[in-house]
């Protein structure tokens, strides 16, 4: 009943007849069109062709939304339409893509609802690269997880340092301390306004590609201007809760769609499966590292203590090697693993990961559970006097 038939028909008809007709579907074009008419006495064919393209883009977007909606009503068993249509608008051509031999461009949704890299304003610096945008998105999405002042440093889409503190200066200091080597040339995200003191510490200490925060105060902007190549972004106020949307992953000849991973746990959702109950401090750090592990590429292992990451093991084919790498990274930076906690994005298939954690000095572990060998895993934790919590929720990230 609410589907407009006549309007889109007239728009398409006018667009088809662009040799004689200028069809305007967006009020933002009025000023430039009036200026052209005033200056030249009419509209060029190039302008009319551009307007026709915009008209067909407009009706395609409208028809796609209708098709998606009706398609989702046909199959009550599925949350997804039988065909999927979407339309994004290009906002930037890039020098190259992930690698110099690849062409690339950045497209955004017509009306992004959530503060993100897509909505951010760039205050200074060189144009964002393909990798800059991907890494900045990873950093910002991770820092959104925290209510306390937080800092996330990302390198190659993986958090290499994450911390929460009473203020963002301390959070940055702690996050940087995790892995100063990897932080070089990284992306830094905050969930609070960036102040001059924190900005100055960053640029005095390290080379950074991108800094993103909800806002940048005037004195911080002045400080950052002394490093004009640093890309500085303001993304606007972060949401209390992220918006449920779809994630896309391209495969050759197709597209995978899934719900955005917004799964979160509260303390009431946790199940203590070990003989030893975590201390209050361990429980706080377990929940902190669990949030971080969600944004680390699988297999993901995160060591943490006192609101900061101690070591991060990312992207390994076996979970035990991710655990070993987290320990190696901590040792390289002379951070004490003993007394730290560990988060794993998925269950432990064998006890070797628990044994490696115990050898490193881990005292508490948070993981989804669900392995065929959960009994052996729990027994290993008890053998090492490690407190263990099951979340019942996995967070693979590929």
Image (tube, rainbow, N blue to C red):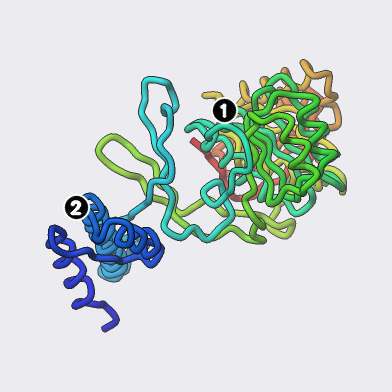
Q: Residues within 10 Å of mark 1 (few under 14, many from 20)?
A: some
Q: State the image quarter where residue 241 is shown.
A: bottom right
Residue 295 visible in the snapshot: yes
Q: Residues within 10 Å of mark 2 (few under 14, many from 20)?
A: some
Q: State the image quarter where residue 341 is shown.
A: top right
In this rendering, position of residue 180 left or right of residue 237: right
Q: State the image quarter where residue 353 is shown.
A: top right
Q: CA distance from mark 2 to mark 1?
A: 45 Å
Give the residue at x 51% y 48%: 118
Please tell me whether mark 2 or mark 1 is closer to you in this view.
Answer: 2
Q: Which mark is residue 156?
A: 1
Report x, y in % for residue 152: 70, 38
Q: Is residue 273 above or below residue 350?
A: below
Residue 300 visible in the snapshot: no
- Please state which of residues 390 and 16 is positioned toward the viewer in this rendering: 16
Report x, y in % for residue 306: 85, 39
Report x, y in % for residue 148: 79, 51
Q: Is residue 182 above or below residue 34?
A: above
Q: Residue furthest bottom?
A: 1
Q: Secondary structure at mark 1?
A: loop
Mark 2 / mark 1, whichever is N-terminal: 2
Q: Is residue 252 above or below residue 63?
A: above
Report the number of discs.
2
Q: Which mark is residue 290?
A: none
Q: Quadrant of the N terminus?
A: bottom left
Give the residue at x 27% y 56%: 40
Give the residue at x 31% y 65%: 65
Give the residue at x 25% y 69%: 74
- Please state which of residues 280 and 87 is positioned toward the viewer in this rendering: 87
Q: Secondary structure at mark 2?
A: helix
The residue carrying mark 2 is 45
For the residues labelled 2 and 1, say whether their Cβ atoms are less than 8 Å apart.
no
């Amino acid at each position: 009943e609410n589907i407009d038939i006549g309007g889109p028909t007239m728009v398409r008809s006018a667009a088809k007849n662009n040799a004689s007709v200028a069809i305007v579907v967006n009020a933002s074009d009025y000023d430039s069109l009036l200026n052209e008419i005033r200056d030249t006495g009419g509209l060029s064919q190039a302008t009319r062709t551009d307007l026709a393209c915009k008209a067909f883009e407009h009706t395609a977007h409208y028809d796609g939304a209708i098709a998606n909606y009706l398609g989702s009503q046909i199959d009550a068993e599925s949350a997804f339409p039988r065909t999927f249509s979407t339309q994004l608008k290009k906002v930037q051509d890039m020098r190259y893509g992930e690698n110099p031999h690849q062409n690339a461009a950045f497209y955004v949704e017509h009306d992004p609802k959530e503060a993100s890299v897509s909505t951010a304003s760039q205050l200074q610096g060189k144009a964002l690269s393909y990798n800059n945008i991907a890494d900045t998105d990873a950093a910002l999405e991770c820092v959104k997880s925290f209510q306390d002042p937080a800092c996330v440093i990302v390198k190659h889409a993986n958090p290499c340092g994450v911390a929460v503190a009473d203020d963002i200066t301390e959070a940055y200091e702690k996050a940087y301390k995790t892995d100063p080597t990897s932080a070089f040339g990284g992306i830094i995200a905050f969930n609070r306004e960036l102040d001059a003191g924190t900005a100055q510490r960053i640029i005095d200490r390290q080379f950074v590609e991108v800094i993103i925060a909800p806002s940048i105060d005037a004195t911080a902007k002045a400080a950052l201007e002394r490093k004009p190549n640093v890309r500085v972004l303001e993304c606007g106020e972060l949401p209390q809760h992220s918006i449920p949307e779809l994630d896309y992953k391209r495969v050759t000849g197709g597209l995978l769609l899934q719900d955005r991973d917004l799964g979160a746990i509260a303390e009431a959702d946790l199940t203590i499966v070990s003989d030893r109950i975590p201390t209050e401090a361990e429980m706080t750090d377990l929940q902190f590292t669990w949030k971080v592990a969600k944004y680390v590429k699988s297999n993901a292992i995160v060591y943490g203590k006192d609101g900061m990451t101690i070591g991060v093991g990312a992207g390994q084919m076996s979970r035990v090697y991710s655990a070993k790498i987290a320990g190696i990274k901590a040792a390289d930076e002379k951070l004490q693993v003993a007394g730290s906690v560990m988060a794993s994005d998925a269950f432990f298939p064998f006890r070797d990961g628990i044994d490696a954690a115990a050898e490193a000095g881990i005292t508490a572990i948070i993981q989804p559970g669900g392995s065929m060998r959960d009994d052996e895993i729990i027994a290993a934790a008890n053998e090492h006097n490690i407190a263990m919590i099951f979340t019942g929720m996995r967070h693979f990230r590929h």
